[in-house]
């Protein structure tokens, strides 16, 4: 397996880059918005070689953690490289871990190509692999917000509405109080 590619960034076209390694150009698919040096600069891209009967493709990431997360996602039934790449373009590895550990299906559904069922599968399959302990960056205050998000989504509110309301809520509080405040904002009471 090819663990990384180090060379000169020769070209960048949307979600693909070409890395010149000793005169050989390696075409690597990267997540949209992936932060890499300028064309002509040296680059190290952590890679995953995806092999299927009819194709071989190299997927690359600026960090090992992103690559490892990509590989975890590929291990989920029904998740291919395009969906895994889309997931990492929307969520950081910490955000993905947080969503899986807290069973925040709504956050996973923000990824193009992931519906409710797929999000539930990802939570179910990745949960044990990521452990029951939330990442260090998950504060106790964020858990009620996840529950409020799920409650509002369950009531039929669109993701954009839920995001807007959650941004207006206090950082901490009881789930019931936060939900009451959110419903007041959605009802036009604030």
Image (spheres, rainbow, N blue to C red):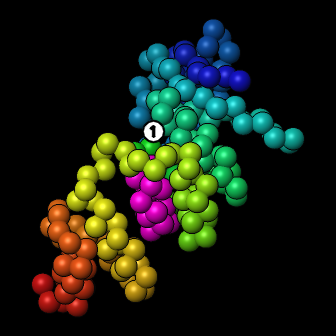
The residue at the point 23 percent across, 91 percent down is: 187
Please identify the residue farthest to the left as the structure is shown: 190
Q: Which residue lies under the disc numbered 1?
A: 34
* Residue 45 screen position, x and y as percent: 53, 25
Please identify the residue farthest to the front as the structure is shown: 132
Q: Which of 3 and 147 is in front in this view?
A: 147
Q: Does the rendering let one see residue 182?
A: no
- Indicate the secondary structure of the residue bearing disc 1: loop
The residue at the point 41 percent across, 35 percent down is: 35
- The answer to if 56 sits in the magenta stretch is no
Compared across the picture, whether 88 is left or right of 174 comes to: right
- Secondary structure predominantly adopted by residues drawn in magenta: helix
Q: Which region shows up in magenta?
A: 96-110
Q: Which of 145 and 63 is in front in this view?
A: 145
The residue at the point 49 percent across, 46 percent down is: 131
Q: Does the rendering let one see residue 143?
A: yes
The quadrant where residue 161 appears: bottom left
Q: Which quadrant holds the N terminus?
A: top right
* Residue 4 screen position, x and y as percent: 58, 21
- The answer to if 101 sits in the magenta stretch is yes
């Amino acid at each position: 397996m090819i663990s990384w590619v180090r060379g000169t960034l020769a070209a960048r076209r949307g979600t693909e880059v070409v890395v010149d390694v000793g005169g050989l150009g390696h075409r690597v698919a990267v997540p949209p918005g992936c932060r890499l040096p300028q064309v002509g600069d040296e680059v190290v891209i952590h890679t995953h070689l995806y092999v299927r009967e009819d194709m071989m493709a190299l997927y690359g990431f600026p960090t090992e953690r992103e690559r490892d997360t990509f590989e975890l996602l590929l291990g989920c039934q029904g998740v291919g490289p395009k969906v895994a790449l889309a997931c990492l373009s929307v969520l950081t590895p910490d955000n993905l871990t947080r969503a899986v550990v807290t069973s925040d299906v709504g956050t996973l559904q923000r990824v193009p190509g992931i519906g409710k069922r797929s999000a539930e599968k990802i939570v179910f399959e990745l949960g044990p692999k990521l452990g029951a302990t939330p990442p260090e960056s998950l504060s106790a205050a964020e858990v009620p917000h996840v529950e409020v998000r799920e409650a509002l989504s369950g009531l039929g509110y669109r993701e954009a509405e839920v995001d807007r309301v959650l941004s207006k809520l206090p950082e901490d509080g009881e789930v019931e109080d936060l939900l009451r405040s959110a419903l007041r904002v959605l009802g036009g009471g604030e």
